[in-house]
Image: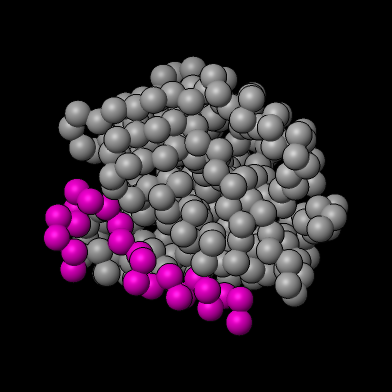
Amino acid sequence: MNTDTTLLEAEPNVYLYQRQADYIPRIAAVHDLCGYGKCSLGVAIPVLSAAGCDVCPVPTGLFSSHTAFPGWYMHDTTDILPDYLAAWKGIGVEIDAIYSGFLGAPEQVDIIRNIYETYPNALRVVDPVMADHGKVYPTYTPELCQAMADLAKDADILTPNLTEASIILGREWPGTDITDEQADEMLRALVDLGSKYVVLKGIQREGETLIHNFVGGKDMDTVEVHNEYLPYMLHGTGDVYASCVLAAVMAGLSLEEAVEFAGNFVHDAMLVSAEQPHFKERGVSFESILSQVSNLLK
């Protein structure tokens, strides 16, 4: 496929990808690989594959388990990535979207920018995985947080939670109890920094039984989409959410429809997860409802 047609001019409903009948789009998934616990490539590969995409992993690190478990092991893959990606060039790999998440070192931002240069027409999706609930993840240094904030400016779709949005904007975390107006102001500030479209996720107000997500962009009014709030936290839901947004976009849905689908899928996956043993440690389970993703193609 000629990837010149991948990123479309935004229409009122903001369709960013035009799916061609029998073509399987190819996505470079720049995430870590976690052995135990649902997150990163362990989420992106099955979700995007269910949407009829060819997922090409670019592993930013290898983890024994997610970092909520004690005694986790990490191997930083930064040194192997230039040769890894040069080999792709050597065999003429084509890419329709570049989807990045957790990074292992600041230098990996430069590596992602090199991927952007190699595939200038690919859709750029940045999930700036670095913090939540006011706390930065344990492997993230100030330098890595700043590098991630710089990468966010290049995104066609940026999907931060409130903590990550605050880091990118250089602000104090406001907590999750913010108004629609405050959410819109933060979203617009991220757009002003360079992101074309922003999905600001995970606003849960005190006393409410809803969780709110907001989507807007350079030529799109801010839209609020909400779901039932479930009173437990699960590791990996952010990765599922961002993967579902991209899956729906690559299936040909509008960005607003993609955000609505992602919220519904994560909600349903959390219900499935609650029936599993040790689900609060293990993380989100979604395997039994992947047909919802496949049905996007019908």
Report if residue 153 is visible in the image.
Answer: yes
Q: Nearer the viewer, residue 274 or 180?
A: 274
Farthest left residue in view? 277
Q: Looking at the image, is 248 positioned above or below residue 41?
A: below
> Which quadrant is home to the C terminus?
bottom right
**Residue 250 in picture, x, y percent from top left:** 65, 63
Is residue 179 rendered to the left or right of residue 6?
left
Report the residue at 58% width, 58% height from top.
246
Is residue 119 rendered to the left or right of residue 105?
right
Report the residue at 42% width, 61% height from top.
212
Q: Nearer the viewer, residue 147 or 99?
A: 99
Q: How many marks?
A: 0
Q: Looking at the image, is 256 positioned above or below residue 55?
A: below
Q: Nearer the viewer, residue 87 or 139?
A: 87
Report if residue 259 is visible in the image.
Answer: no
Farthest bottom residue in view? 298
**Residue 189 in picture, x, y percent from top left:** 60, 40
Q: Nearer the viewer, residue 199 or 280?
A: 280
Magenta stretch bounds: 275-298
Q: Is 296 contained in the magenta span?
A: yes
**Residue 213 in picture, x, y percent from top left:** 46, 59
**Residue 197 in picture, x, y percent from top left:** 65, 51
Q: How is the image coloured?
A: one colour
Report the residue at 19% width, 28% height from top.
71
Is residue 173 rendered to the left or right of residue 72?
right
Q: Is 118 contained in the magenta span?
A: no
Report the residue at 53% width, 78% height from top.
295
Q: Looking at the image, is 223 positioned above or below residue 169?
A: below
> Which quadrant is home to the N terminus?
bottom right
Farthest front residue in view? 91
